[in-house]
């Protein structure tokens, strides 16, 4: 539910605050003769604690800032609310501390900041509408199983969503299902991935997309990724895509070719801004297709017209002939259909930053033509590397979550492994790392259960909680230690989602179970579960019994690997290859990498 506004409008308290953007009050009128702007966002109430977001770092006058602060506190007190949680600009903290430093009922917290790929900066998240966030995440193309690397974007988007909700924001989240239009090699020309899979597997397109969507959803559930509000499928939006492309053509942003309708990138002066400095280099890359008649090499297909006369399983009539939509067009149309013309945050893997998202922006801003940025925040997660190379389906070596589970790794251990790195860092994956994460999660879960004592396993430990609610409970319990710990979790998370810092402080606390009373641990664990999705206090030792297939013994495999390593050391390649084949008959697959040999149990399918 959207939060109930508490503070504002300020007309009664201060005539100088006036309505500005939706849900905000401008405070620029407070600045006496100096240039500067600011805003106050009407907040919400949890128990006896009110949250208010404020930005005054653009206001030069300290007196004016003090007046804003007084207006806020007096209104909160007038409403009978005891405590105030104030989100401020980082650079403005000192001016607030000067005024509120001695007041135990006012807690200053930093605002949520994220790395915006637009401009490559860490920025405060300021949403279009107060207390609400529109979030779109590029979803999977459902033509095969999602490998471990493919799951990182969704765990990352889930962390972001959890941080926003923790700060009391109402999140509308959309993840699309690409069931048509994504071509091999992310290109504009060639075979559709889904159609290709249908042919290769001898199954209908519907069977293919249903099967791989279901297994993707199963993996998300195992990873405790919260489902979005909407799962749009590209095939259900084709008529809207045609309308969207027709508008672009009508306005002169697109031109028809025999190969389809192409977007004219030269008409967009800001084209490629998101890709940054590497953009020119990227253009020389292989993914830019040579298409007869294209005006510029960066122009891309909004609609692909089928000209070879071959019958496709997925094709639609359009003003540009029988064909299918372009992949980039799909995301623009689905996101705008569900979140409105402009929304707040768009996420995806870093591989989308240079092309897919560049093209989404170009066509969407051309379509809207309102002189405003389409989406304010673009966030990208880095790759999961496997043996030194980016883990992509085309690179082979595909490992699925199911393969890890077959190794005896708890699925949430994979989630924990991802949270142990910042989303903006590449992560070099090995099975050993996953096994380590499994052991670490098992240990952490045991310590937390010990701290919780009889409270272990309670349903309430899974109930999401906001920072304001948790702090309110800490105040009711009269525990400044609990409040400090909540603020430490919060500080790690809102500073660009540094989940690895959050896990580090949690690990420290877990070593001293008696450092907090059980009732306080309960609040803390709820907060941790809200932010990490790790289900602590609910996981039991029995959940960690390795379900490794009975015919596979880890020690035996490790012994074989050591022997094979010795053979390789003396360049006995024939023996090393024989051992590889021997292991393969037991479904053990090997990956020789510069950092050593990794193994995994091949899954079915
Ligand atoms: Zn997309």
Image: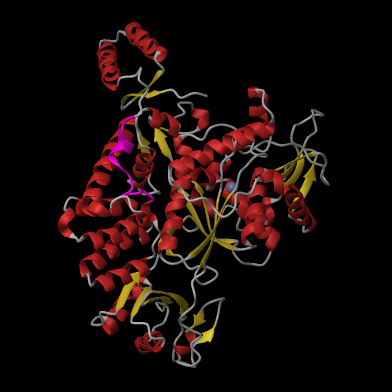
What residue appears at the point 51 percent right and 91 percent down from the top-left corner?
Answer: 11
Asked if 161 appears above or below 21 in the picture, the reply is: above
Q: What is the total number of numbered labels drawn onto the structure image?
A: 0
Rendering colour mode: secondary structure
- Left or right, 197 with respect to 468, comes to right
34 and 430: which is toward the camera: 430
241 and 185: which is toward the camera: 241
378 and 249: which is toward the camera: 378
Across and down, in percent, residue 586 comes to 39, 14
Q: Is residue 542 magenta?
A: yes
Asked if 298 appears above or below 571 in the picture, the reply is: below
Asked if 52 appears above or below 521 in the picture, the reply is: below
What residue appears at the point 29 percent right and 84 percent down from the top-left corner?
Answer: 99
What residue appears at the point 78 percent right and 53 percent down from the top-left corner?
Answer: 246
Query: Which range of residues does the magenta coloring cover?
Result: 533-546
Asked whether residue 504 appears in the rendered view, the answer is yes
What residue appears at the point 43 percent right and 46 percent down from the top-left corner?
Answer: 224
Q: Which residue lies most toward the top here?
A: 574
Across and down, in percent, residue 574 comes to 35, 6
Q: Which residue lies most toward the front here?
A: 454
Q: Is residue 40 magenta?
A: no
Q: Main secondary structure of the magenta part?
A: loop
Across and down, in percent, residue 277 comes to 49, 50
Question: What is the quadrant of residue 520 in the picture?
Answer: bottom left
Asked whether residue 122 appears in the rendered view, the answer is no
Question: What is the quadrant of residue 595 in the picture?
Answer: top left
């Amino acid at each position: 539910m959207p939060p109930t506004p508490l503070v504002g409008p300020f007309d009664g308290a201060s005539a100088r605050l006036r309505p500005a953007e939706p849900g905000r009050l401008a405070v620029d009128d407070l600045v006496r003769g100096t240039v500067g702007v600011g805003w106050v966002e009407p907040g919400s109430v949890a128990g006896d604690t009110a949250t208010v977001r404020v930005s005054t770092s653009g206001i030069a006058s300290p007196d004016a800032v003090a007046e804003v602060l007084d207006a806020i506190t007096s209104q909160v007190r007038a409403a009978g609310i005891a405590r105030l949680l104030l989100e401020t600009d980082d650079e403005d903290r000192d001016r607030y501390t000067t005024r509120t430093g001695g007041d135990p009922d006012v807690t200053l917290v930093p605002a949520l900041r994220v790395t915006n790929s637009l401009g490559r900066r860490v920025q405060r998240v300021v949403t279009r509408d107060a207390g609400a966030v529109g979030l779109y995440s590029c979803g999977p193309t459902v033509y095969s199983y999602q490998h471990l690397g493919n799951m990182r974007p969704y765990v990352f988007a889930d962390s972001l969503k959890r941080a926003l909700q923790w700060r009391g924001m109402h999140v509308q989240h959309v993840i699309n299902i690409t069931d048509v239009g994504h071509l091999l090699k992310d290109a504009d020309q060639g075979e559709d991935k889904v159609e290709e899979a249908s042919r290769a597997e001898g199954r209908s397109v519907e069977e293919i997309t249903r099967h791989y969507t279901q297994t993707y959803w199963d993996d998300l559930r195992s990873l405790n990724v919260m489902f979005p509000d909407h799962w749009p499928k590209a095939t259900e939006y084709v008529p809207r895509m045609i309308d969207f492309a027709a508008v672009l053509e009508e306005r002169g942003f697109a031109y028809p070719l025999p190969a389809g309708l192409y977007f004219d990138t030269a008409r967009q002066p800001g084209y490629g801004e998101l890709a940054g400095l590497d953009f020119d280099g990227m253009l020389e890359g292989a993914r830019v297709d040579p298409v007869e008649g294209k005006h510029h090499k960066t122009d891309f297909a909004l609609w692909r017209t089928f000209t070879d006369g071959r019958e496709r399983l997925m094709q639609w009539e359009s003003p540009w002939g029988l064909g299918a939509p372009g992949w980039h067009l799909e995301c623009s149309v689905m996101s705008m259909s569900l979140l409105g013309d402009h929304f707040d945050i768009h996420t995806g893997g870093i591989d989308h930053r240079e092309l897919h998202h560049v093209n989404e922006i170009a066509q969407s801003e051309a379509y809207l033509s309102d002189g405003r940025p389409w989406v304010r925040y673009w966030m990208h997660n880095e790759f999961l590397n496997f043996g030194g190379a980016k883990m992509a389906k085309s690179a082979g070596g595909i490992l699925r979550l199911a393969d890890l589970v077959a190794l005896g790794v708890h699925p949430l251990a994979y989630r924990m492994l991802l949270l142990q790195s910042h989303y903006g860092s590449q992560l070099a994956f090995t099975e050993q790392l996953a096994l380590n994460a499994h052991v670490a999660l098992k240990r952490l879960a045991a310590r937390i259960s010990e701290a919780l004592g009889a409270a272990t396993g309670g349903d309430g430990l899974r109930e999401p909680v906001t920072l304001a609610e948790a702090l309110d409970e800490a105040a009711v319990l009269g525990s400044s230690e609990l409040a400090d710990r909540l603020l430490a979790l919060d500080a790690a998370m809102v500073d660009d989602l540094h989940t690895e810092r959050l896990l580090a402080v949690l690990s420290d606390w877990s070593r001293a179970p008696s450092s907090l009373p059980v009732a306080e641990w309960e609040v803390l664990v709820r907060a941790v579960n809200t932010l990490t999705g790790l289900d602590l206090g609910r996981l039991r030792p029995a959940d960690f019994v390795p379900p490794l297939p009975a015919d596979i013994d880890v020690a035996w495999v490790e012994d074989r690997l050591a022997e094979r390593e010795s053979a390789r050391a003396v360049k006995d390649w024939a023996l090393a290859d024989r051992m590889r084949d021997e292991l393969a008959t037991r479904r053990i697959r090997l990956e020789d990498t510069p950092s050593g040999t990794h193994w995994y149990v091949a899954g079915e399918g």
